[in-house]
Amino acid sequence: MPNILTILIVFSALLSLIFLIATVAALRKKKVFTSAFRFLFALLALLSLGLLGMIGIATEGYRALTHEEIAAVVKTEPAGAKGFTAHFRFPGGREASYWLAGDALYVDAHILKWKPIVNMLGLHTAYELDRVAGRYIDLKEERESIRTVFLLSKDKPFDMFTLRQRYSLFGSLLDAEYGSASFINANKPAHFEVRVSTTGLLIRKVGPEVSPQPKN
């Protein structure tokens, strides 16, 4: 979570607490108008806290995107006539392996582009890898054969990509939200880079194994 957003969440929480305490104090002194006025400010602070907290949770797992970068390095190994194992290594060192049915490696991602006013909170264009799947070259096999799909994104109670699609409120914060996908044949042992840029996702075959660069 961006530092500025964290500071605003803490500030909103403190402000809510201060106004709630002030409301109780005014009620004890039977100052109805003053207590109502202070309670209104406490309510506004709580609403701000809720919105900022939701944004923080919903963007957990998203990584800032300022240029083309490696989102994951994948090593594929054939496993049967129509299957392969994909070994993922993500920025930060996390690793995961998936058995996938098909001839090709398919990966998709969610990309968020925030409006300039939200950039002041430390939120900029961001991405999160969403799913990995096996893909068949032959359309008949794609329709009739076994399908394998796995989640790459973090499991969280809110996701900003989904919230933007459901609620028009977030349209004032996000300039655009879109999905991007790419696939590449993976029926032979190989190393791939899953790269993401502001224009979308791509998978590139590479020679020696490389590692995604962690963000500072």
Image: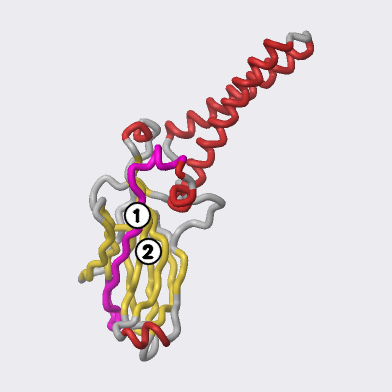
Q: Which residues are magenta?
A: 169-191
Q: Is residue 172 left or right of residue 190?
A: right
Label 2 is placed on what type of residue?
Arg
- Helix, strand or loop at label 1? It is strand
In the rendered image, the vertical position of residue 54 relative to residue 200, given as above or below: above
Q: Residues within 10 Å of mark 2 (few under 14, many from 20)?
A: many
In the rendered image, the vertical position of residue 68 relative to residue 172, given as above or below: below
Q: Position of residue 71 (x, y in %)?
A: 32, 58
- Res 123 quadrant in image: top left
Kindly identify which residue carries mark 2: 89
- Helix, strand or loop at label 2? It is strand
**CB under 8 Å between discs 2 and 1:** no
- Res 132 quadrant in image: bottom left
Q: Quadrant of the N terminus?
A: top left
**Marks 2, 1: nearer the viewer:** 1
Which residue is rendered at x = 34% and y = 71% of the image? 106
What coloring was used for the rendering? Answer: secondary structure
Q: Position of residue 93 (x, y in %)?
A: 40, 58
List the single residue furthest toward the front: 168
Kindly identify which residue carries mark 1: 178
Q: Quadrant of the C terminus?
A: top left
Overall secondary structure of the magenta section: strand
Q: Position of residue 128 (x, y in %)?
A: 39, 55
Question: Does the magenta-highlighted stretch encompass residue 30?
Answer: no
Which residue is rendered at x = 25% and y = 53% of the image? 197
Q: Position of residue 45 (x, y in %)?
A: 57, 26
Q: Nearer the viewer, residue 48 or 65?
A: 48
Which residue is rendered at x = 56% and y = 36% of the image? 50
- The circle on residue 12 is none
User: In this figure, what is the number of numbered marks?
Assistant: 2
How far apart marks 2 and 1 lie (CA) works out to 24 Å
